[in-house]
Every structure is written in C-alpha cells, then in structure tokens.
C-alpha cells in the first residue's frame, strides 16, 4: 500500500514537473521570436508554434502536412523542397534561407533549421525545426555582399594596380592585375609582408610616403621612378582604418611625353640648343644676382647666311646651322648657356666670377670657330660671324637692359663690316639713338626739300670731252648740316625709304640731263633695295618719258652686292632694265667680293673701278697690276672702263697710258650743284673744242 502511495506520489510529482515543463516550453515558445515546428519522419508537418499562425495568417490545419508550402515565396519553393528532400533522405540536419509571404502581404527572409530525433536504432522518430526571421540581417548582408562585389569589380576593372596592407604591412588584398604581377615577379601571395616582397623599396621615397599617409591619416600622392623596370609610377597611398590601400599606375609614357613637351618648350628644335624662352629666364636670374655676380652676354649673328639659304637651299642652311652650333658648343665653358634665338642668331650667357676679360676671350674663341670652312654635303662653306658683347651692370633696371646692350653691340659689329667683335659701351647707345632720330628726320627730308642732287662730270679720256655726269645725292640736315650719303643711304635702305627717294633721284636727274647736250649721259646710283622692287623698270621708264630723254642716255650704277644676293631674280631685273635701252654700270668694282663669275652672266656696259685703287697709282706696283688687268678685262668684254677718284694728273696720265676709257674725279671736276653743271659742261666743251682746233695744225704737220 505504502508502495502504491509512493508510486502515486511519484506519478503526481512527475505530472506536475511535466506540466511545468510544458508551460515553460509554451511560454518560451510564445516569447521566442523563432517559430518551432515538428514534422513526421517522412516530412509532413505536425505542429507549428503559434508565431507561425501569427506571422503567416495560416491556421495550424492549413499548415500541417505540406500546407506550409503555400506561405513560401514561389521562387524559393523549388530549392527549399530539394533541401528538405535531401535531409529526409539522408537524415542529416538542414539549414536553408527562404522567403515567406506574411499575412500583411510583406515578403521576408527566414532561416530554417531542422534536426531529426533519432531512436535507439538510429531511425528518425520525428523532425524538430525552427524558423527564424533573419530578414533585416539578410538584407544587410546581401547589401554588403553587393557593395563588396561592386568594390571588387571597380578595383578589378581599374587600370591601376591595387593592394591593401594592414598595419603590419601584410598584404590583405590585391586586385588581379597586382596579384598577377606579384606572383610572377616575386612569387607573392596574400598575407605576405610588403617589405619581404619588395625589400629594395625600403628606405626609399615609397616607404617614407606610406609611413606619412599612415601617420597623418591623409592620402599621399606622388610620382616615383623605379629603376628596376625603368618606369615611372604615379602612386596614391590612401590610409584606411586598419592599414593602407595603395593605388598605382605606370605613367612612363605620359611622363616621357611631358618631358618631351617640356624639352621642346625650352629647346630649339633645329640645333637642340636652348631657345629664347630659356635665355630670357636665365637673363632674369642673372639680373637678380647682378650685385653679387656679373654676367656677360654675347650675341652672334652669321654674316651672309641668307645667301647660303638662297643659293644652296634651306636643307643645307639647316645643316649648316647645326654644324655651327656643334662647333661653337665646343668653345663654351661649363656654366655657359648657349641659345639659338631664331634664324642665324645665337646668344651665349657667360657667368663671370672675377675676370671680365673672359667675355672677350670667349668672343675671340667663338670667332676663331669660323676660321675653317664648314663642309655640308661635300660643299665647303666659308662663314663669318659678327659678335656683340655686353656685361651686366648693377644699374640695370631689368634683364632686358643687358639684352639691349648686347644687341646694340652686335649692331655695331655688323656695321663695322663682317667678322667683327664689338663690345658695348655707353656711347653706342647714344649713337644708336642718334641713328634712330636721323631715320625719322630722313622720312621728312624729301618732303621738306632738304635733299638735292649734285653732279660730278665723267671725262672721256681719248677724246677729252665730257661724256656725262653722275648724280650724287646730298642731304642738308636743318641742324646737323651736310650729311654724307654713305651715312644716310643705309638708313634709307633700312626703312625702305630708298625706293621713294630713288624715284625722286631718277626723275630729278633725267630732268636735269634733258637740258644738257644730247650726247651727255646721266649716271644714277641704284641701291640693292631698289633692284628688289619689281616695279623698278616702270619707274625708270616713267622718269625717262617724264623728262623726255633717250633711254641710251641713262646709266644705272649698281654695286657687286646686288649680284651676290638673290642673284637669279636680280639678274632678271638687270635684263628687264637693259631691255628699256638704258646702260648698266658696275660701280665700285674691286671692293666687296669681286667674284668675277657674275661678269659671265651679265654683260655690263661699264666697269667703274673703285677709287681706292686709283689712289695707289704711282705707289703700289701690285695695285697698278690689278688696275691694268681690270682694264684689259673691261676692254675684252667691250665695256667702258671708268676710273673713279682721279685726283692727280699722274693718275690720269697712267690711266690714259693703260687704256682706260673714262676718268671721274676731282681732277676733272668735283660734284656740282644742278644750276652749275650745265654751264660747266657747255663751257668745258667750248674750251675743249678750241684746244683741239689749236692742236689740229700741229697734228696735221706731224
Ligand atoms: P659712288 O657712286 O662710288 O660715288 C662716287 C663717290 O666718290 C661720291 O661720293 C663722290 O663724291 C666721291 N668722289 C668722286 N671723285 C672723288 C675724288 O677724286 N676723290 C674722292 N676722295 N672722292 C671722290 P659721295 O657723293 O659721298 O657718294 C658716296 C656713295 O653714296 C656713292 O658712291 C654712291 O654709292 C652713294 N650714293 C650717292 N648718291 C646716291 C644716290 O642717289 N642713290 C644711291 N643709291 N646711292 C647714292
Ligand atoms: Mg656711283
Ligand atoms: Mg663708285
């Protein structure tokens, strides 16, 4: 009995504990955010916790068996059933994610877990499972995955190499581009320490900048040259919370292109020398240091380079400029800056320490560089240069002052003839200024009637008659008085005014000659600038017809320089003039180049020997030999031979004896004013006629 009572008590106790456990389970179930469920060994749902009905709105009756599938999002159904079937077949636990349609229409993600309850023999008694709402977490995870995938995509599709290291320099990420490189070059992989992969980068700009980015928390962007691959990298080191992301790309081509552009911007393309931009920059610098250190500037201009270009072509001209640059470079010192300023103009900036004479010495050396011929394409070319030098001065107001000074000196050097060196001095600037003023004055001289012509007679040696006269231009400046044509004609040529002045001279001279005896010629000097003017033949014709004189009475004097420059065109011009019927004389023969070759190309009517030869008659047998030869040549080519500057009877007699046909000079007559020359010619002719008459009987007797 007692045993029965004990058993009943135990039973009651057990029931109470069971109830208690059930209540606890129910409470736990109701409080839990997980749905619990039970299914049969073959997979039919037997029970769901109330949360199922709360969420899906499906009653337990609707849900048991396979009814629960109706709450499942159709797209997920296939996969979920497959997983379930697999678990039932194998008796393995299952985990899956799928979406359920809730009673409010919302679609949410749930995580499903199921495990079998097994009997002692291992067969499945039933399945216990949970369904947990993981929607928010799943959506966040998907978003994270998507953004990670996007970042990875971006990092893969960039042309940059990308890697990430942690604070211990361990590589935690590499994009494929970088991974391929590291694998091939260094057998590297994720987790390797950067400095083990690239030990040679330690202690370089790369390491310093990586550290800086980490230390400051700010990205550091820089360019680095990597000698091992002879490449330039553009590197961006971006600090992150737990390390550093490094982006870099090969910018070698861009860098080289930039270098090329920079070089072109500072280099003369033809010679490779510095260009004007560099020269100006260096002059600016020298100007800033002018109190501590003086600077010499040498300007060099090639003489007659244009002729080389015109006659031998631009290709040879270019080659010649390169050769000049190459040869002169050898004469320069370490700190000298050698520039080509364009055309045939070069400049050297020469920094001086103490010895100012080194500028002169350098100029001499540069000049000596022209002693030997240049050989281009087998052609020997003899060049000369003019050099102007100037020194910086503490009183200079800008870098331009030094440039101007050297320019003025160069101008002087050129004026002084070819192959000259000229150093700047203060007086030069004054003279240049005076010249500029004179140019301006000359422009109005013609209008104001300050120009006039004088006439110098030419004597026919054999007949003793006046053959004609040469018109010579005179300028009486209102304040400076008489200015020599040798001084103002180059100015008029510079400004182009010579064309207008020359026109006036032609007309004036022809008008004068119209009043002279009809067998008297009038000689007019033509400047090379006038010859270049295509309308010259018309201008000449106009002057002749305006004055009404026969073309054969007009003699145009040109100098040798006309045939040196642009000879083809100028020769054509001479022929055109000749066609009008005027005579062409070669003036100042023997000066300048005296290349006899052009005498072959144009049949001059007259050769006028320069007066510097005539002055030597009786003093220099060599000169006499030359004059004799020139006379012979003139005769052989049927030219009138005129000797200029005949001042003495001895000179005249010698010329007469040696067969010269005409004499011009003070002995016969100085240049005369227009009003005087006609009477002089007529008077002179009358006297001459008398003399001849006087001599006739004697001749007859003889
Ligand atoms: P040119 O044509 O050779 O003229 C001869 C120069 O010699 C003239 O100098 C004349 O005055 C000078 N002369 C003549 N006989 C003697 C002499 O016995 N002894 C000395 N010591 N000198 C003598 P000018 O008039 O000073 O002319 C100098 C140059 O200026 C001329 O040389 C000519 O090339 C140029 N010129 C003069 N007038 C004109 C002109 O109307 N147009 C152009 N384009 N040039 C001109
Ligand atoms: Mg003359
Ligand atoms: Mg002359």
Image (spheres, rainbow, N blue to C red):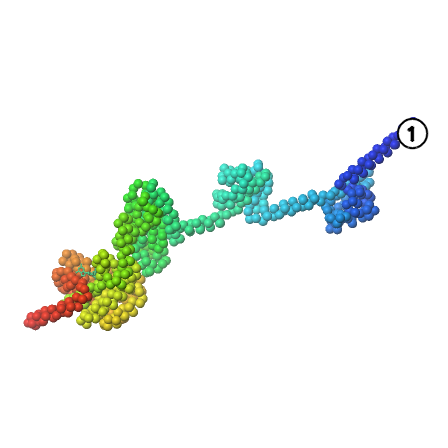
Q: Quadrant of the N terminus?
A: top right
Q: Is residue 465 left or right of residue 92?
A: left
Of residues 188 and 614, the one nearer the viewer is 614
Compare residues 487 and 634 and report the one nearer the observer: 487
* Mark 1: few/some/many CA within 10 Å (<14, 14-19, 20+): few
Residue 501, position as x, y percentages in the image: 27, 63
263 sits to left or right of 151: left
| Residue to which mark 1 is pinned | 4
Numbered circles on residues, count: 1
Is residue 632 at least partly visible in the picture?
Answer: no
Look at the image and tell me whether residue 206 can be seen.
yes
- Viewer-proximal residue, 607 or 622? 607
Q: Is mark 1 within 8 Å of ligand 1?
A: no
For the point 20% across and 60% down, the residue is 610
Name the quadrant of the C terminus: bottom left
Q: Residue at 31% across / 65% down in the picture?
A: 533
Q: Quadrant of residue 474?
A: bottom left
């Amino acid at each position: 009995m007692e045993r029965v009572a004990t058993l009943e008590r135990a039973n009651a106790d057990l029931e109470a504990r069971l109830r208690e456990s059930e209540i606890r389970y129910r409470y736990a179930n109701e409080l839990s955010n997980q749905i619990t469920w039970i299914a049969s060994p073959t997979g039919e749902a037997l029970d769901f916790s109330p949360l199922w009905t709360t969420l899906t709105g499906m009653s337990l009756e609707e849900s048991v068996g396979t009814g629960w599938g109706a709450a499942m999002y159709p797209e997920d159904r296939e996969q979920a059933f497959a997983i379930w079937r697999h678990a039932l077949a194998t008796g393995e636990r299952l985990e899956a994610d799928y979406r359920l349609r809730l009673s409010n229409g919302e679609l949410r993600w749930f995580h499903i877990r199921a495990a079998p309850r097994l009997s002692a023999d291992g067969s499945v008694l039933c399945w216990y499972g949970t369904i947990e709402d993981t929607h928010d977490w799943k959506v966040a995870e998907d978003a994270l995955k998507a953004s990670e995938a996007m970042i990875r995509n971006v990092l893969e599709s960039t042309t940059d190499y990308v890697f990430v290291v942690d604070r211990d320099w361990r590589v935690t990420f590499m994009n494929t581009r970088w991974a391929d490189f590291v694998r091939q070059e260094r057998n590297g992989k994720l987790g390797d320490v950067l400095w083990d992969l690239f030990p040679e980068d330690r202690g370089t700009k790369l390491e310093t900048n990586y550290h800086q980015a980490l230390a400051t928390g700010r990205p550091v962007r820089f360019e680095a040259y990597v000698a091992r691959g002879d490449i330039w990298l553009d590197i961006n080191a971006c600090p992150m919370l737990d390390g550093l992301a490094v982006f870099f790309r090969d910018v070698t081509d861009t860098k080289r292109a930039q270098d090329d552009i920079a070089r072109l911007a500072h280099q003369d393309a033809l010679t490779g020398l510095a260009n004007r931009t560099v020269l100006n920059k260096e002059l600016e610098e020298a100007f800033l240091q002018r109190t501590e250190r003086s600077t010499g500037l040498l300007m060099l201009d090639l003489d007659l380079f244009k002729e080389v270009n015109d006659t031998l072509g631009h290709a040879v001209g270019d080659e010649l400029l390169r050769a000049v640059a190459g040869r002169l470079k050898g004469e320069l010192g370490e700190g000298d800056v050698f520039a080509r300023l364009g055309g045939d103009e070069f400049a050297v900036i020469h920094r001086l320490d103490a010895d100012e004479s080194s500028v002169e010495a350098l100029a001499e050396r540069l000049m000596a560089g022209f002693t030997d011929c240049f050989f281009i394409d087998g052609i020997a070319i003899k060049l000369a240069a003019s050099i102007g030098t100037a020194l910086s001065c503490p009183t200079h107001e800008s870098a331009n002052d030094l440039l101007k000074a050297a320019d003025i000196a160069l101008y002087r050097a050129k004026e002084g003839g070819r192959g000259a060196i000229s150093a700047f001095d203060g007086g030069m600037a004054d003279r240049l200024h005076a010249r500029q003023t004179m140019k301006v004055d000359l422009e109005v001289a013609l209008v104001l009637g300050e120009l006039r012509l004088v006439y110098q007679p030419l004597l026919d040696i054999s007949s003793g008659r006046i053959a004609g006269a040469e018109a010579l231009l005179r300028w009486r400046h209102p304040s400076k008085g008489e200015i020599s044509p040798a001084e103002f004609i180059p100015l008029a040529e510079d400004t182009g005014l010579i064309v207008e002045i020359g026109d006036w001279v032609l007309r004036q001279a022809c008008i004068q000659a119209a009043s002279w005896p009809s067998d008297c010629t009038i000689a007019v000097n033509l400047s090379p600038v006038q010859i270049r003017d295509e309308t010259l033949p018309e201008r000449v014709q106009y002057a002749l017809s305006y004055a009404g004189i026969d073309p054969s009475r007009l003699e145009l004097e040109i100098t040798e320089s006309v045939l040196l420059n642009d000879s083809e065109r100028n020769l054509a011009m001479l022929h055109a003039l000749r066609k009008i019927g005027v005579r062409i004389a070669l003036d100042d023969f023997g000066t300048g180049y005296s290349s006899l070759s052009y005498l072959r190309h144009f049949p001059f009517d007259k050769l006028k020997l320069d007066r510097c030869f005539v002055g030597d008659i009786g003093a220099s047998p060599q000169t006499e030999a030359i004059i004799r030869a020139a006379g012979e040549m003139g005769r052989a080519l049927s030219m009138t031979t005129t000797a200029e500057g005949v001042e003495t009877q001895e000179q005249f007699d010698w010329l007469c004896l040696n067969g010269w046909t005409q004499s011009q000079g003070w002995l016969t007559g100085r240049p005369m004013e227009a009003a005087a020359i006609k009477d002089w010619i007529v008077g002179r002719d009358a006297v001459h006629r008398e003399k001849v008459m006087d001599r006739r009987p004697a001749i007859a007797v003889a």
